[in-house]
Image (spheres, rainbow, N blue to C red):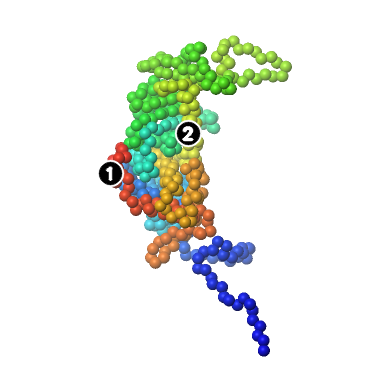
């Protein structure tokens, strides 16, 4: 009797590990069942790196030693109230009423150790109690935080470039300080006119001031320039300051000289005379000429150097019409004049000033982060909220700097090659960085009486996120640079308030 058997009767062993194509395709249609789960889900899985970053820089230590508390004493405490507002802005919500959307978020509730966050009016009442003293305290927090991040990233600039610019915040109510002035988008409407100051090397916010909606006076510009030196990190010894024509006055120039800053300020109102025999062209193919002179405007204490470039105007000619010659030579050119204390060729100085154009992108990004949000009718409250917004803006900058530093860390586990997911993040805008570092779905679970945050293995961003979290944990396990005897010149020593 012959027995027939199948050839392939050997059982296959099932691997316990995750296979790239081992999952079965899911079938989702109108008849698909749905139900609830007991785990808490969060769309902001990137808040865990932020929490680790705040612990890495010892933010609570900076806050407790620098912050001047207002009269209102919240139940959560001043630190958690401010951190809650910072997290709201970090996520991308720029109005306090938006707390209603994240009151039950698992990551936020887990950080505050609450089942749900307080109502939005609780945070609004706290912001309404803030004033000028708290705004100045936030500037001091920014300075101390900047110095610690620079030490962590091994940044030690001896010379930096600072760009100053003004912007417009249109108001649609009866807010204090609103004036009708220069408003290109809404002509004739009341607005505020803040000043912002950025460091070009790191693209971070250095100093700012919320102002009434009017032109900057010479005394006001000088007072602002005098404050810059007190907020620079200890390693910085030389500064090149660049500003537009609104800041040109003898008071501002004298303030730069007194502080020891190099400066290039666009001309407004001065009429220096240039020697017609000193015009030169650095490039033969470009019809652009440069010149310089030493000139003392009326009311100025000393003479200063002025550099100029002139560009021929395009003469439009209609069909069948002859071009009419201009009477004076100056009418044929467009002039750009700058006041400076730098030596060297005029075209190199103006080329250095033109690099300031990037500050417009930084101001625009800051406005999208919440600078345009005006929560109160009180000027002092809006002034404090202005500094909170810029603090959240700088935290995004620092988190991207730390993430870039983690890519080059050779000691981290590179088996999954997760660092590649964060390459180039320093050059990304905050909007793109949110997609890489924040908007990652996470599940908050409790296993063996331990809270854990789990990320999906099907998300392409998970390897980069895990790599970054490991790097932060390793940095948190080490002694901080400011706690050991290092040669880094520290300027801001923290003392309890």
| Helix, strand or loop under label 1 | loop
Looking at the image, which residue is at 30% across and 42% down? 486
Q: Which of the 4 quarters of the picture holds residue 317? A: top right
| Helix, strand or loop under label 2 | helix
Looking at the image, which residue is at 60% across and 12% down? 326
Q: How many marks?
A: 2
Residue position marked by numbered label 2 in the rendering? 359
Picture quarter with the C terminus: top left
- Residue 485 marker: 1
* 47 vs 420, nearest the viewer: 420
Q: CA distance from mark 2 to mark 1?
A: 36 Å
Place of residue 226 in the rendered image (x, y in percent of width and height, measured from the top left): 35, 29
Looking at the image, which residue is at 45% across and 16% down? 293
Q: Is residue 459 left or right of residue 226?
A: right
**Mark 2 neighbour density, 10 Å: few (under 14) some (14–19) many (20 or more):** many
* 313 vs 249, nearest the viewer: 313
Q: Is residue 419 above or below residue 218?
A: below
Extreme residue in the top direction: 327
Looking at the image, which residue is at 42% across and 15% down? 295
Q: Is residue 120 above or below residue 171?
A: below
Picture quarter with the N terminus: bottom right
Return the disc, 2 or 1, that comes first in the chain's sequence.
Answer: 2
Q: Is residue 404 above or below residue 177?
A: below
Asked if residue 255 shows in the view, the reply is no
Q: Is residue 209 left or right of residue 486?
A: right
Extreme residue in the bottom direction: 1
Place of residue 171 in the rendered image (x, y in percent of width and height, measured from the top left): 48, 35
Q: Nearer the viewer, mark 2 or mark 1?
A: 1
């Amino acid at each position: 009797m012959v027995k027939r058997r199948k050839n392939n009767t050997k059982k296959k062993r099932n691997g316990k590990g995750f296979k790239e194509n081992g999952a079965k395709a899911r079938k989702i249609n109108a008849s698909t069942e749905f139900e609830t789960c007991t785990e808490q889900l969060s769309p902001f899985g990137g808040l865990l790196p932020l929490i680790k970053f705040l612990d890495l820089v010892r933010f609570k230590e900076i806050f407790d030693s620098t912050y001047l508390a207002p009269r209102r004493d919240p139940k959560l405490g001043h630190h958690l109230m401010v951190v809650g507002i910072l997290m709201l802005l970090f996520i991308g919500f720029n109005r306090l009423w938006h707390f209603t959307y994240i009151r039950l978020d698992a990551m936020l509730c887990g950080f505050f150790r609450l089942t749900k966050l307080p109502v939005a009016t609780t945070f609004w009442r706290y912001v309404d109690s803030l004033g000028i003293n708290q705004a100045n305290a936030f500037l001091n927090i920014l300075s101390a935080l900047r110095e610690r991040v620079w030490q962590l990233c091994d940044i030690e600039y001896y010379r930096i470039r600072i760009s100053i610019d003004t912007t417009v915040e249109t108001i649609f109510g009866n807010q204090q300080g609103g004036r009708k002035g220069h408003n290109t988008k809404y002509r004739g409407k009341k607005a505020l006119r803040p000043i912002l100051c950025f460091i070009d090397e790191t693209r971070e916010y250095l100093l700012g001031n919320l102002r009434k909606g009017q032109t900057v006076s010479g005394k006001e510009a000088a007072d602002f320039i005098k404050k810059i030196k007190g907020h620079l990190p200890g390693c910085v010894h030389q500064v090149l300051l660049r500003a537009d024509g609104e800041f040109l006055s003898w008071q501002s120039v004298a303030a730069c000289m007194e502080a020891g800053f190099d400066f290039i300020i666009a001309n407004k109102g001065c009429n220096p005379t240039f020697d017609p025999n000193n015009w030169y062209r650095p490039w033969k193919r470009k019809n652009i000429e440069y010149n310089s002179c030493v000139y003392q405007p009326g009311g100025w204490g000393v003479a200063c150097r002025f550099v100029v470039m002139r560009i021929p105007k395009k003469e439009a000619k209609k069909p069948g019409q002859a071009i009419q010659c201009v009477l004076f030579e100056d009418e044929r050119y467009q002039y750009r004049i700058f006041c400076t204390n730098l030596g060297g060729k005029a075209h190199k100085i103006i080329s250095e000033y033109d690099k300031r154009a990037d500050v417009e992108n930084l101001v625009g990004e800051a406005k999208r982060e919440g600078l345009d949000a005006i929560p109160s009718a009180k000027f002092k409250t809006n002034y404090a909220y202005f500094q909170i917004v810029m603090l959240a803006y700088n935290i995004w900058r620092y988190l991207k700097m730390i993430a870039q530093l983690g890519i080059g860390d050779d000691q981290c586990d590179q088996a999954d090659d997760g660092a590649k997911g964060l390459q180039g993040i320093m050059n990304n805008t905050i909007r793109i960085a949110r997609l890489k570092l924040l908007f990652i779905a996470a599940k908050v679970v409790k296993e063996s009486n331990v809270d854990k945050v789990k990320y999906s293995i099907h998300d392409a961003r998970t390897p980069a996120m895990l790599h970054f979290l490991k790097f932060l944990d390793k940095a948190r396990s080490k002694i901080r640079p400011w706690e050991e005897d290092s040669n880094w010149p520290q300027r801001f020593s923290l003392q309890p308030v």
